[in-house]
Image: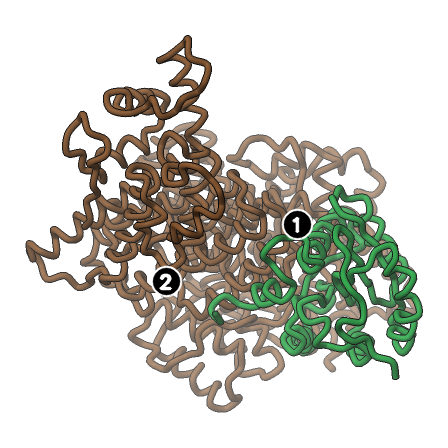
Amino acid sequence: MQRRQSSKTPKQPLQVHHKNQTDLSAWRKGGRIDLENSVQNDQSPNDQKNDSKQDSLEQALSYFEKVQDRVSLKKNDVLQKHLNTVESIALQRGLPPEGFDVLLNVALSGKLADTVNTRLLKSLVPASVIPENSVISSVSWLCVSKCSSNIQLLFLRWLITVFDFIDHKEQLHALYGFFFSFLQDEKMCPYVCHLLYLLTRKESVKPFRIRRLLDLQAKMGMQSHLQALLSLYKLFCPELVTITLPGKMKTYFKNSEGPWKAAINTVRRRNQENSPVSRLLFLGTAQPQSRKRKWNTQLIIPASSTNQNNLEEDREKNHVDLYSMNESFPVEQLQTFSQLLQNIHHLEFPSQMGSVLTNPLLLHYMNCIKDESIYLRLYYWMGQTLQEECTWCVADSQYEEEFKDFLETVYKTECFLQEGFSSCEEFLYRSLPLWDGFCCRSQILRLVSWIPLSSFSEMKSHLYDPLAQLFFTSSLYFKCSVLESLKELLQNWLNWHVIHLDSESDSQVYSSNTTLSGLVNVVAELIHFVGWISTAALRLENNPTFLLYFILDFYETVCDMYLRYNLPLLIMPPAGVFYPALLSMDSVSLNQLCYIMYRYRTNLVAAKQNELSKKKILQFKFSSQTYQEYNQYIIAMVGCLWTSSAFQKDIHPQGLRMDDELLKKTTVQEFKTSFNIVYHPAMMGYAVLFLQQAWPDDTTFNFSLIKGKKWNWYLEYLYAQGLKGLKVFIESSINRVSQASHSKAGNVQV
Amino acid sequence: MAVLRPFDKLPALNSAVLLLVGSDEGLQQKLAEAMLREKKNFKINIWLMRAGQCYLITSQLLRLWPQFTNTAGQLGCLCFSDSLKNVEASLAHVDASFFLGKVCFLVTGVGRVNYCSVEMNAIWKLGEVYCSPVLFCELELEGIRVATAQRLLRMLQICAGHVPGVSALSFGSLMRNFADD
């Protein structure tokens, strides 16, 4: 281990660096941040209140700044005192931005013993942000190898953990090649890969780097961290990376957060509670924080996300310079939509991708530029956050409320962008099988509705199976919520299909598993799944109207897929749904069923006409089975409601057909008419009211009076009561030979 | 070794018996209390068994059986919430064909097993071998305990035959996956 005295001044490593690194000019151009300025900016009154602490920290910092010789910790009380001060303040309140430069310099310069360096590095907990230039100078220390490899590793892990706290990253990006050269070191390789994964942009992907990575992979075997980086490269430049990589990985990187994460969280929580002014650091574009929560702090854009010089200039001038093309507009100043439009050509995303979630303007921007890397950054951040903080995975209810808020925000963003996030999908797939069905229930179920289309086998084992188990053992209300979110899932898929149908020229649209036939299959599987759980649920819960409403609501979308969403697919509800609805005690369900059957008819007729006219060669034809099923149902329905012949004419294998002999044994009189629109249990209430109005003097409730002309009046009465579904059904599906005759009604089959 | 056999006892209507087998008596007790607090339209008897003395399960059960045939009668559901090893050992003492569709495994502390895929696979496999559902719950937390109690009651009601047209067996096959049928 090197323990030599170093006489370097802090500026020197930059020059050494300059020799090794060709691309430092970019770093120099960026301009340095005024350190003093940032000191003033970042001082919170909380610090001032606590003067003694502040003083001792300042003393400690100035001590570490000046320390020259290698000092032994055991023998030197002064060093011990200052080290303790730094540690205790760091863990309690976090370190101010100006502290990082000093401490990183001393820790990485190898002046002190490794135990001291480790303790210093471990106490580098940011109170607000970390200035980029302190990171840059410490990276240059790495280059001169003054510190041991353990310290180098610890520094990299620290850098990965606090990556989001670095105020801006332009200069750090310029050091990409430098980090890349560290890949050779076998011990550092995983961490360097992780860091590069965070830093990589499209322009960083170069053929020689790909070659190097492939060489490394050949040498070291398939390592998940190398694969992660390669797959990222492949995503940016598919034409350069031609090897095939395994699809989804569970985790690319080992948990490298080390000792800092917990401290960072406590410090952030504490600082937010104690000093409302520290909020000034976060020029949030979201509403002021009424509830101070960990999630929300991540979602707020720190003021320092873009070049600080710009920020100050803009503040002085107090206007926006339209023509400064080379300078980016600070996102935290973005307040209005017109500002977005004016500056859309030079906007830069904040370093903290999470902050995008709460900023509608940035979401608009994201939607508009369609930059793959932006989504990647967001997914990466979100995937990490969801994995780390999932409440039932860590079995800790303390943060449940915060987690709920976070999930809510993610859901709203998905709605806003009209797009499911793959990081969310992975999270759901991973956690649904372990879910208790209670924790964050409504949030999880809402997120389910944004699961992107994927292959059936994946959806079955990750979504359908766990959902079915929860569904069957849970309450009626849970069942209804599941049905509701599956309906939204279906609608989202269908909307996606319609939107992408319009832009079919886009080559990316129908990739691998999202061909039209693939889509049709996946949608069909979803509908079959819902049919299956609905049938079972109706039986388990004994046909409650409430449940039936949600089931039929789902089928209201299904029955219109061909005409409304242009999808060549129609699936009839199973008999286990159709018959409970037809024989329901409630007019709402019956009316809903009538409407659905009318829409099925309209869709099927349109499909048949298309098929017959052969305007275009149809890729998909509805199977004759669909028509057959429809006809069976319509016969049963017309037989029930209109011609009073359901028991004779129903030809569905699970239908109502019964022998007259058997029916006579029931000793029910007039069994034939017992389900027509007068006697049907769901309609009888209307019939009674109608009788009371038509024959106010008659108290015998003679339903047989409703016939002939009165039958028509009765129909008009029903329509006037709001049974619109029944109206469209009767008008479309029942061919009334003459207005006067009610017995001669037939049905139209398609 | 005494083994519980089918048709040893006949079911009674409107009552159900639940056997909770596990080693954490505190949690068992709490879960049972939560179940008793729930509103329900049938009588319920909950028997808590310690899995540590798993060899006692059947003999104890048989000894107790006459007592609760009079009052309750129907064994609805058997739940295991315990370490995998204990559960497996306990399962050796029950006639699996009798309990088919009536066994359910409660897994607690998912957070701790989350990163240990071997253990999870073993649990899935256990559920598959015994054709029984696996429920995940954190019984330490009040809300989840209540939700779990409700789910168990619902299953108990079905398994005890209180839902017309649905037997424990058909429910069991329902709980097993959708594309199998």
Q: The green chain is which one?
A: B
Gap in Å between the C-alphas at discs 1 and 2?
Answer: 28 Å
* Mark 1: few/some/many CA within 10 Å (<14, 14-19, 20+): some
Judging from the image, what is the letter of the chain drawn in brown?
A
Of the 4 image quadrants, the one containing the N terminus of chain A is bottom right
**Residue A256 location in percent, x, y?**
65, 68
Measuring 23% from the left and 51% from the top, which residue is drawn there?
A566
- Nearest the viewer among A301 and A204 is A301
Q: In this view, does A601 lie above or below A184?
A: above
Report if residue A108 is visible in the image. no
Of label 1 and label 2, which has the lower sequence position?
1
* Quadrant of the image occupied by residue B96: bottom right
Q: What residue type is labelled 2?
A: Val
Q: How crowded is mark 2: few (under 14 residues within 10 Å), some or many (20 or more)?
A: many
Name the residue beneath numbered marker 2: A522
Q: Nearer the viewer, residue A223 or A600?
A: A600
Dot 2: chain letter: A
Whether residue A614 is visible: yes
- Find residue A246 and report its image quarter: bottom left
Residue ID at (44%, 65%): A200
Image-based side of A525 in relation to B170, left or right: left
Name above or below for residue A401 compared with residue A493: above
Image location (x, y in percent) of residue A139: 58, 67
Residue shown at 74% from the left, 64% from the top: B106
Q: Position of residue B94 (x, y in %)?
A: 79, 76
Q: Name the residue under label 1.
A: A438
Residue positioned most to the bottom: A219
Circles 1 and 2 on the same subunit: yes
Local SS, label 1: loop
Q: Is residue A572 above or below residue A137?
A: above
Say what secondary structure mark 2 lies in: helix
Front residue (pair A250, A702): A702
